[in-house]
Image (cartoon, coloured by chain):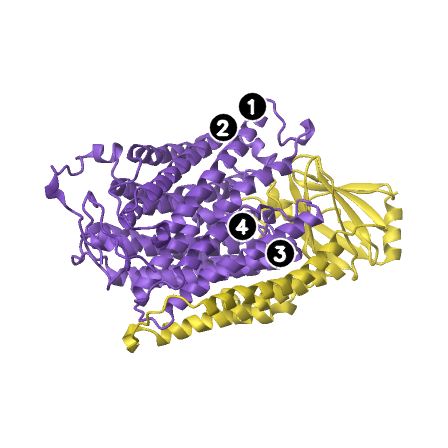
Chain colours: A yellow, B purple
Amino acid sequence: MIRKSLLCLPGLFWAGQADADWAMNMPRGVTELSAETYGLHMMVLWVCVAIGILVFGVMIFSLIKHRKSAGAVAATFSHSTTAEIIWTVVPIIILLVMVIPAAETMIKMEDARDPDISIVITGYQWKWHYKYQDEGIDFYSSLARTSLEARSKGADVDPYDVDNYLLEVDNPLVVPKGAKVRLLITSSDVIHAWWVIDLAIKKDAVPGIVNETWFRADQTGTFRGQCAELCGKDHGYMPIVVEVVEEDAYQTWVASHH
Amino acid sequence: MTTAVAGAHEVHDDHGPEKGYRRWLFATNHKDIGTMYLVFSLSMFFIGGTMALVIRSELAIPGLQFVHPEFFNSMTTLHALIMVFGAVMPAFVGLANWMIPLQIGAPDMALPRMNNWSFWILPVAFSMLLSTLFLPGGAPASGWTMYPPLVLQTGDAFPFLIFSIHLMGLSSIMGAINIIVTIINMRAPHMTLIKMPMFVWTWLITAYLLIAVMPVLAGAVTMLLTDQFFGTSFFLAAGGGDPVMFQHIFWFFGHPEVYIMILPAFGIVSEIIPTFSRKPLFGHDSMVYAAASIAFLSFIVWAHHMFTVGMPLSGQMFFMFATMLIAIPTGVKIFNWIATMWRGAMTFETPMLFSLAFVFLFTIGGFSGLMLAIVPADIQYHDTYFVVAHFHYVLVPGSVFAIMAAAYYWLPKWTGHMYNERLAKLHFWLSTIFVNLTFFPMHFLGLAGMPRRIPDYATQFADFNTMASIGAAGFGLSQLIFVYILLTRKKGPRTTAEVWENPQGLEWTVPSPAPHHTFEVPPHVGSKDGFE
């Protein structure tokens, strides 16, 4: 295991398409906005890498070249207005280049108008409750029994023997592919946060406040997440599973819940 | 150069330090109080570090092996509170007590009795905080951010938590007042503000930040107290309050707090790099302006800790832009340090090694900070191990490495002996290797989707967690070398007053070890003194 980790370290910057059980980078996700978020993440990462190579390069050059043991004699200069103007103005330009696409994505993220489906999500210590507003479906979603058996201290079950340990629920959220799903997120006790990385959604569930967000999944599949805001002793044990299915499978699922 | 007038004991009856416990309990001497702060800070560093090792042991492999989830949460909570308020902040106050009078040519701090009080409050505050481990309901487990309503579920520990934070705040405010009064009133003649060494400058700015924000924290926790016991509903939705308001108030304190823990580190590094580059600090004045700009900006970026709470779009935009602005003065500082090294004649004694690692690794923490400023990406990073990696990079190889650098830099001045350089270099290399092994993999964990503050995790996160746990154990053990170096501090050869090769600053004009009383007559500061 460890050897694998060490071998993969140099691969950090090429890890964009890492597979699911060996992830070291943000996934691209399955919505338009998750792909944009991934793009922003990679853009700022590469900008940082470029600045890092430049700055650390100069520093390392100086550390090698300007050492007393190499016979360097200290210069005496202590300012240079030109240099200081350059390294104040250039970063401003770089920041502006990064901030504009970020702002564009933020505007899209806030636009939850005209949804196809609205789901009210309520956080509880320590499970989620989902209520489909128009379909009249509602249910709780808790950690799956398989994980429950392995999670306690000194459990007989090895976590490696459990499929999707700590990331499986009894009743997943089911939504159709391509539909605009509006989420209305709140809590009944303490603050939780509903997070599914492939949907690029993380929104706090705050008691007394209803937060709004939305997603439109472009692929079918099972997408997993966890509560992201410390909510007490079982904070680590309230996962989220979203199943994105074809429209007809969704209709069958809805019908089976009546 | 400066005329050394220290140790002018013949001019009056010498009164050395008192003997026994009275020297420490009734201490009013800035050097003694500085030493007590530093020793206190080091002991808290080990207590908080032990808690970190409990956390890392539990997270070494998937499944729950050692502790229950509630105790795990107590460990993360106490680790943070102890490291922030007990280790990093007192270390900087201790260094300020020792070095500010020596650097500005003052005989002592301006308010010595308050100085005594502000130190002795701390052991009381932390005894109170640590006593919660033994109370019914356990120690606080809501994270050091103490978000309601969760924090209101704390057991009997709750009022102890609130009052210990009040005491820590009181101590910080008194320390800050003392530092401001000393710097403003007690500088040697001709040491104008702009000529002050960078460590003094950054501490002056930090002290104003402390006075501005510690009362805000006190207000926030007092509102928690009245919500819990006196029927108010500041943060309770059921009574018409707003839980998110606590986060706004907390982070209005919390973000300047971040700079309280890094600005003195900037000052330290700005002292050390010129000494070992044998070249004056590049852009002294722009360093001062950059530190002041960072301090100002720290008041208008607080909600970047809260991009997922559901803020209006315009609010998110403002806090994103303001946050990114911080990169500019911070960049100026890093560029100035590198320009100081450029065409210098560098040597690599331990203080310099720690300072260089600071510049490298703090910059990495700065990069992840820039990434976190991009709101859509932050929504993915928020409350994951990416954030844990980010703030540990700025706090451990940032603040803590700067404190280590300062300790090695000034230790010969304090003791009169050179520390064991070979062991110190070993301490440096082990610390640097293990700190990266601990915190670098956390970036990957966060990006891949591991939330922070969880006692157990899905199996795909196992490898990086194991690496981080090995790194943490190594880092913790490496710090024992530092303790050994401190215990054998007087075994090394005696040092001169200057200690290093032609260092600048008034502290190098007094003998080593610095006598109990220094600068009873103000030194003369020539136009060439200071890091200009």
Quadrant housing residue B16: top left
Read off the chain for label 4.
Answer: B
Mark 4 and mark 1 lie on one chain; the one further toward the N terminus is: 1
Decide: is B150 above or below A55: above
Residue B159 is marked as 2
The answer to whether dots 2 and 3 both sit on one chain is yes
The reply to whether dot 3 and dot 1 touch (C-beta < 8 Å) is: no
> Quadrant where the C terminus of chain B lies?
bottom left
Instruction: Tell me the residue that label 1 is attached to.
Output: B229
Coordinates of residue B211 in the picture (x, y in percent): 45, 38
Find the distance from the CA under tag 2 to the CA under tag 4.
Answer: 33 Å
The answer to whether dots 2 and 4 both sit on one chain is yes
Find the distance from the CA under tag 2 to the CA under tag 3.
Answer: 35 Å
Residue B449 is marked as 3
Residue B297 is marked as 4
The answer to whether dots 3 and 1 both sit on one chain is yes
Left/right of residue B113 with respect to residue B129 in the rendered view: left
Residue B109 visible in this rendered orientation of the protein: yes
